[in-house]
Image (cartoon, helix red, strand yellow):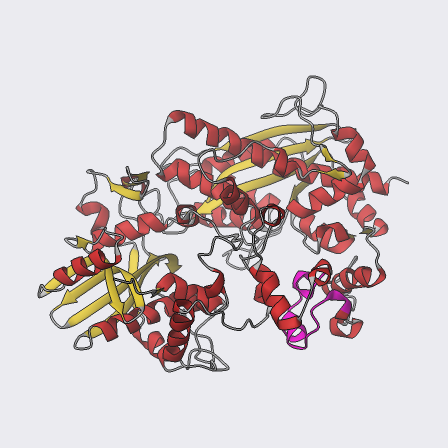
Amino acid sequence: MNRIITLTKSRFKLACECPTKLFYTGKKEYANQSLSDPFLAELAKGGYQVGELAKLYHPGGVDIKSLDYDESLAQTNVALQQENATIYEAAVAYENLFIRIDVLEKRGNHLHLIEVKAKSFDPDDRDAFLTRKGTIKGSWRPYLYDVAFQKHVLTHAFPGMVVSSYLMMADKSAECPTDGLNQKLRITRNAQNRLEVIVSPEMNDADLFVPILAKVNVDPYVDLIWENHDSDPANLLGFEDRIALYAASYADDRKILPVLSSTCASCEFRCSEEDFVAGKRDGYRECFSEVLGWDEADFADPTVLTLWNFRRKDELIEDRRIKMTDVTEDDIKPSPDGKPGLSTSERQWMQVDKIHRGDDSPWIDTDSLRREMHSWRFPLHFIDFETTMVAIPFNAGRRPYEEIAFQFSHHVVHEDGRVEHAGQYLNAKPGVFPNYDFVRALKRELEQDDGSIFRYAAHENTYLCKIHQQLRADPGVPDRDELCAFIQTITRSTGSSVETWEGERNMIDMLELVKRYYYDPYTGGSNSIKYVLPAILQRSEFLQHKYSEPIYGAAGGIPSKNYQDWRWIVRDNDTVRDPYKLLPRLFQDIDPTDEELLSESDELKDGAAAMTAYARMQFEEMGDAEHRHLHDALLRYCELDTMAMVMIYEGWRNLLVP
């Protein structure tokens, strides 16, 4: 019997992102920069534990564990013969469509479709799903389209039944009823190497008495999608027509004509250098070649996809002005904003103009940056945090997805130029809420003097302000006033802060300094420290000379907590290697490509690998040796983050020497 080629909900989700991707997915000849192990994608978000907790809130269900298409359908249909039933991972098919439903409840003639997501939801937000125009918010569309597809399949598979649909998510307003709930849902792999969540025998009624997951009926939003009223402008094809098109195209192995847009920048079907060497095909290039007629030489030219922070990319793409050389000054309209350095539009035009003129030299606003540096007080402190948000809280009274700061690194530069890795903190002990000890340790590091403090981006400021809120709401912390006062000295209050302040040692954001005073075409338009550091190392003879010697962590050299006799400058011919590529692997038991993707993903570039390592140490069953390896690797990676800030500072200082 020939197996029907089915459109599953994961393939439907992919087609909603880009219908052309259906042709590339699952084919070994095409490069794919997505994580090959879905475990890693869900681990840091807490998806597996949330899914298991949802089952505990719907007890007594039948778990359809078979991965076989026919067997899983048969087992589901047997369970549905009962008048009332609860089914986990229910398998349902209609024509060439196939879904697995997280939780399916049957109550007589009524089916309750429950899709569980490791996403936070605020029940007090009445407009959570809709824009002011009454269309579905972009952030919610993937989740609601997922449910709409499942309800479509379920309704057609059981036409005599009434179907209601729900999203079940972490309730941000709920307080965890007990301590240690998250440690009662541990992750392991079984003999078949499949992931399992092990529910502790200590789990009891008190743990489940106050649900921390909210079940939200989403039928009104599914109706909007079905009726094609969910977006403005409306889709050219109705919802059912799109499903039919996707299903038929996938079954026939027929490519849907590409439509180029700014989202192509994040296409996963692009070849890395290793993929090209391995002879992989590049779906991204095929799309551009088919639509624009590009040949190999065209792909060497920079495109508007890399134009920093430019919101009119789709207009240019629609006008078939894809290459940077097609962009004009009138497209950017560069103008000053009354502040020192480059405005956003001026920086955008500099990126374009340097390409027009074939100028690959770096630019630095020496006067403005020198004025900034003269205002800094020594010793200079460089700090970096590693943070996460967990769906299932560590302690009673805490809420889902509260901010957790579990690690920092701290470098100091003295007025005479001496550099030292002065301190660090890492608390990855399972089930421990680390925030208050984190701030205490940071306070000890920074209260010894009044030197200027540096961060890279707003992340550190945001998290300290969140911890300030947590402290204000927690009367059981004996030194909370002292800790809050310290936080206020080194931060600026955010929009969500109840109080308003700006500390006398408010941290200086090096990212803002980069944006306004420094641009290097070598970064490709990115301002991430992961791009700025290799750029300045490639340019600076001073840094190359200093760090080509094994002085880091050496006797008489630069003190380090985690390195010994280390060289930061290693060359591949004329190119200085990225220092992050020099570090030992963070994970020893996953595909090296997956580890690289965790470190390079645009959205979570500066934290995804650390978040995943922390999550594994919290929730995965592992031996002491593996735990120690992850612990030590996290310390090394975070230390490099602050050392990167130091090297950028040193490179600038050397450039500004008269």
The front one of 74 and 324 is 74
Kindly identify the residue that appears in the image at 37 percent across and 69 percent down.
144
Of all residues, the one furthest to the right in this rendering is 658
Q: Is residue 270 left or right of residue 469?
A: right
Position of the N terminus by quadrant: bottom left
Residue 259 on the magenta segment = no
Of all residues, the one furthest to the front in this rendering is 1
Q: Is residue 284 left or right of residue 374?
A: left
Q: Give how far across and how far down residue 611 sits, in percent.
A: 47, 43
Name above or below for residue 97 compared with residue 266.
Answer: below
Q: Give how far across and how far down residue 339 sits, in percent.
A: 77, 61
Kindly identify the residue that appears in the image at 76 percent across and 60 percent down.
351
The front one of 145 and 4 is 4
Residue 311 on the magenta segment = yes
Write the start and end of the magenta stretch as one range.
302-325
Q: Is residue 649 visible?
A: no
Of all residues, the one furthest to the top in this rendering is 555
Q: Give how far across and how far down residue 487 sits, in percent.
A: 55, 44
Position of the C terminus by quadrant: top right
The front one of 582 and 230 is 582
Q: Is residue 330 left or right of residue 117?
A: right
Q: Give how far across and how far down residue 534 sits, in percent.
A: 71, 42
Q: Is residue 596 visible?
A: yes
Name above or below for residue 92 compared with residue 565.
Answer: below
